[in-house]
Image (spheres, rainbow, N blue to C red):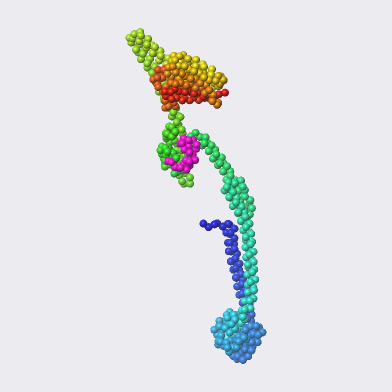
Amino acid sequence: MFRKRRFLWQIYPVFLLIIIPCLFLVVWFATRTLKQLYLSEISSALEAEARLAAMSLEKSLLTGESSGVEAICREMGKETQTRITAILPSGVVIGDSDEDPALMGNHSDRPEVRSAMAGQTGVFIRRSTTLKKEMINVAIPVRKGETIVGVIRAAAPLISVSQMLRSVYWKIALLGLGIALLAAIVSLILLARVNRPLTEIERGAERFARGELGYRLHQTGPEEIANLSKTMNRMAGELEERLTTTSAQREELETILSAMVEGVFVTDPAGRITRLNLSAARILGVDPRKAEGKNLEEAVRNPEIQRLVAETLSRRKPAEGEVVLLNGGERFLAVQAVPLPAREKEPGGALVVLHDITRLKLLERVRQDFVANVTHEVKTPITSIQGFVETLRGEVGPEETKRFLEIIAGETERLKAIIDDLLALSRIEKEEGKGEIQFQAVPVLDILKSAQKACATLARERTILVELEGDPGLSAHLSPDLLEQAVVNLIDNAIKYSETGSKVRLELSREGDELLIRVRDSGIGIPAEHLPRIFERFYRVDKSRSRKLGGTGLGLSIVKHIVQVHGGRLSVDSTPGKGSTFTIFLPAI
C-alpha cells in the first residue's frame, strides 16, 4: 500500500507542473518570436540593399552586358558588408561580391531565385556551398515592363545573428529561471500558510477522536478553512453533549439492569449473547464475562430457553413459557423473549427476560400442602368423633361407653390444640404486621428457666432429665412470653422424640454479636431429606408417631415465626438415631 502524501506535497508539485511548462512555453515563444522578428528585420535590410544594388545594375541587366557588374557587386558588398549576387533569368551568375562568377554554378534551382523569377521577393535560409556558411538569402526580381530581366540577391551569414540571439536567449532563460524560482518559493509559502491551519485541523480531529472533546480549534486561515474550524468546534461541542447524555443514560441503564431482580440478556440475530446482567448470570449459573460473545447453545444448556429464543428470532414475534432449571437445585423460571428492532436493514436480535418464580411455586406447593394437611388433620378427629358418636347411639355397655367418650374427649382436645396453634400463628403474624409486639431487654437465662419448669411435668412422666447451662449475664431485646413459647415447643419436641431415661440439654452462649439458644436431644433424629421442610405448617416426618404423641404439626412453624419476629434465625442439625440440635440465633446487646 502506497503511503499517503500530505496535502502540501500533493498540491505543490501540481503548482510546479503548471508554472514550469508555462514559463518554458513563454520563453520558447519569446525566443522564437524574437528570432522571427530579427530575421524579418535582416530580411528587410537585405531587401533594401538588394533594391539599391538593382538600381545600380539595372542598366547592365537590361543590356545583358556582364562587364562592370562584378566590380559593382564587389564595391557594394564591401560597403554594406553584404554578399551581392547578380543573376540572369537563365540562372547564370554574372556578378558576385565574394566569389568568381565563373566558378559558381547555375542558380536557377535556388529557392529564393525561383521565387524572384516568379515575380516575388524570395527569402530563404540555407548553407552556402561556396562559402560553407549558413546564410540568409533575399532575392528580388529586376523588371523591364512586365519582363523579368534578372535577379539581384543579397545575403548575410547567420553566425552573427546566432551569436546575438544566443546572448538574448541566455538572458531570457535566466529571467525565466528566476521567475520560476520566485514563483516556486511564493507558491510554497502560500501553500504552507494554507496547509498550517489544515494541519491544526488534522491534529484537532485526532484529539477529538481520542475523546478530548473540550479542545477547540483556532479559527484562522482563509474564510473556508476558518468556517471549517468553526464547524468542527460546533460538532465537537454537540458530540460532547450527546456523549455525556449517552454516557449518563448508559450508566443509568447499567444501574437499572444491575439492580433488577429479573435476569435480562440480549442476543444478536445469530443467537450470540451480547449482553447480560448479574441476575441473569446468577440464574443461569454462568460467568457474565465468559458468556458474552458465545452462542446461546454454548452458554445456556437449556433446550426450552434455546427454543423460545430461536422462535423469537425466526418468527420476529414475542414468545414466552415456563422453564425448569436443575443447576444447583430445582428452579422455576418464567421466560419472555421479544424481538429487537432491525438496524440498517439487518434483523435485530432478541431481548430475553427471566423471572424467577421458584418462591411462588414453592409457596403454591406449601399452600396446597397446608390445605391438604389441615384438612387431613381436622378430618381425622372429626371422623373418629363421628364414628364413636354413631356407635354410642346403639346399644353398648357402660365400659365401652366410657372408653368411647374418653376417645371423643381426646380427639376434641386434639382439635382444640390445632385450633389454638393456628390462632397463635395468626396472632403472631397479625401483631408483627401491626408492630404490636412489645420488646424489652431481659436476661435470657430467666426465660429458659421458665421454659424448663413448664416442661418439667412431661419430662418426669418420660423420666427425661432437662439440663440447663448458660451465662446469667446475657440479655437481649425480646418478648419474654413469645420466646418462652418457642423454647417450650423445642423442649416439648425433644422430650417426645427421645428415649425414656435420656437427657435433653438446654444451652445459652454468645458468639460475636449473637446469642445462641441450643436444645440438644439424643432421640430418633430427622432424615436429611426432611430437614428443609420441617418448619412448614402441618409437615410431619413420621405422621403416625407424631399424632400418637399428641403433636399438631404446627409447633416448629410457631418457633420459626417467633424467631423471625425477634430478627433472628433458626437452624437444625440432626443425625438419624443420634439425636437433633435446634439452635436459635438472636441479636445480642
Q: Residue furthest top?
A: 398
In the image, what residue occupies the spot 39% across and 20% down? 544
Q: Nearer the viewer, residue 542 or 469?
A: 469
Q: Residue furthest left?
A: 395
> Is 280 part of what is drawn in magenta?
yes
In the image, what residue occupies the spot 60% across and 48% down? 233
From where the camera sits, is residue 211 visible?
yes
Where residue 381 sits in the image (x, y, percent)? Answer: 39, 17
Q: On the picture, is 516 further left or further right than 218? A: left
In the image, what residue occupies the spot 43% across and 36% down? 320
Q: Nearer the viewer, residue 525 or 211?
A: 525
Q: Residue 322 lies in what quarter of the image?
A: top left
From where the camera sits, is residue 59 visible?
no
Magenta span? 271-298
Residue 337 vs 56, above or below: the answer is: above
Q: Residue 166 lies in what quarter of the image?
A: bottom right
> Is 270 part of what is drawn in magenta?
no
Residue 433 vs 55, above or below: the answer is: above
Residue 131 vs 280, above or below: the answer is: below
Where residue 59 sits in the image (x, y, percent)? Answer: 62, 89
Residue 213 vs 108, above or below: the answer is: above
Q: Residue 168 lies in what quarter of the image?
A: bottom right
Where residue 253 sits in the image (x, y, percent)? Answer: 53, 38
Where residue 8 sits in the image (x, y, percent)? Answer: 59, 58
